Image: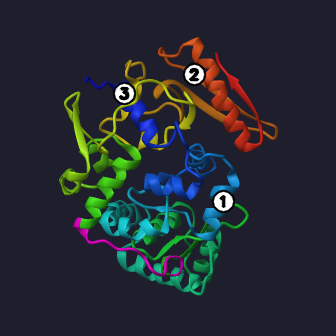
Amino acid sequence: MTITDVDIARWRLRSQRLVGEGRPDAESVVRELLCVQAENQSQSAWAVAARTVRPDPADLDAGLADGRVLRTHVIRPTWHYVTPDDLVWLLDLTAPRVRATFATQLEQLHGLDPARVERLGGLIADGLRGGHHLTRAEIADLLNAQGHDLTGMALMVLLGDLEQQQVVCSGAPVEGVHTYALLEERIPRPRRLDREEGLAEIALRYVGGHGPATVRDLAYWATLTPTDAKAGFAAVADQLATFEHDGRTYWHLPDEEPPTGPAEPTGHLLQVLDEMYRGFQDSRMVIDAAGAVPRAREAAIGMVLHDGQLVAAMKRSVSARAVTFELRPYPSWRARMRRDVDVAAAAYGSYLGLEPRLKLP
């Protein structure tokens, strides 16, 4: 059987719960995908909700409030949703390479050497100890009271570094504003794996929630060396299967076959930060089998998928009454796709409690 780019894209829609049966709640989605990129919280919440049976903003909000879901920097130097059971072993595995990015920014861009980072980290930890959850602004005030003027990007990078050090993680949001808490208080009994166990676990779980995927896809996604990603796959080779396509080896769960055709829902309105796009690098563009999308840096932060294929760029705007999706079609767009994309817009609008509006040139 010949497997095509379209087959792989459809397969990934299924693996990521964007078609077929959704997951019961936000926590289940995050656990199954292992990590979900969460850089833009107002829009990444839909990335989680779109994969549930009944999309509801209160679902993820509740998970973040009680700590069943955390929003923190892990696997790459950007925000991700992750469960407490998975955060610490993932940090043990990936933080050494990720932290190098933060360390460079702290010292070269913000003049914070390791000694000062350690002092500031100690002050922040003292301020959070005892179950205190503080916003970034409150942490800035705390440091200012101790004679340290640190705000804006410098403080954000410092907090990201402290997340890599397992000092802080996300606390309960306050009126929708992100807070920080001590990791040891938020996760008093962390799950830990040794390095070999961690590589095996991340390979198996990544394929389960994203596959089919390649060694280089995993290396990118989790900031691993290709050698480490290959070792992870080798450790679970007896629990996975492979096929060759376009000069690449794709790993997938055993006893799975590629979908035989489109599955519902066929249309999706997503961000390019969504795991369907950002969850890969080596084989990302199986979602553009027609080669219709320029391979330059993304010109829009939103995308329209139809049957797993990228058919339009999308810009989302929200007003008091409506959510508007402004589409810029690629050559692969067809007028017949409008009906399925209208269905996707209606689902998104219902989730936000707003009237959906779709705009085409």
Callout 3: SS: helix
Q: Is residue 357 left or right of residue 340?
A: right
Q: Amino acid at mark 2?
A: Arg
Q: Is residue 267 visible?
A: yes
Colour pattern: rainbow
Q: Nearer the viewer, mark 1 or mark 3?
A: 3
Mark 1 → mark 3, Cα distance in angstroms: 35 Å
Q: Is residue 296 visible from the viewing direction of this image?
A: no
Tag 2's secondary structure? Answer: strand
Q: Disc 1 marks which residue?
A: 61
Badge nearest the viewer, 1 or 2? 1
On whether residue 187 falls in the magenta region, the answer is yes
Magenta stretch bounds: 185-196
Magenta span contains residue 189? yes
Coordinates of residue 28 in the picture (x, y in percent): 53, 56
Circle on res. 328: 2
* Sequence order check, earlier mark of 3 and 2: 3
Residue, x 40% and y 30% (percent of image)?
259
**Mark 1 closeness class: few <14, some 14–19, many ≥20 residues within 10 Å:** some
> Which circle marks residue 296 in the picture?
none
Type of residue at label 3?
Asp
Query: What's under tag 1, amino acid-wise?
Result: Asp
Which residue is denoted by mark 3 in the rendering?
7
**Residue contact at pointers 3 and 2, CB within 8 angstroms:** no
Q: Earlier in the sequence, mark 1 or mark 3?
A: 3
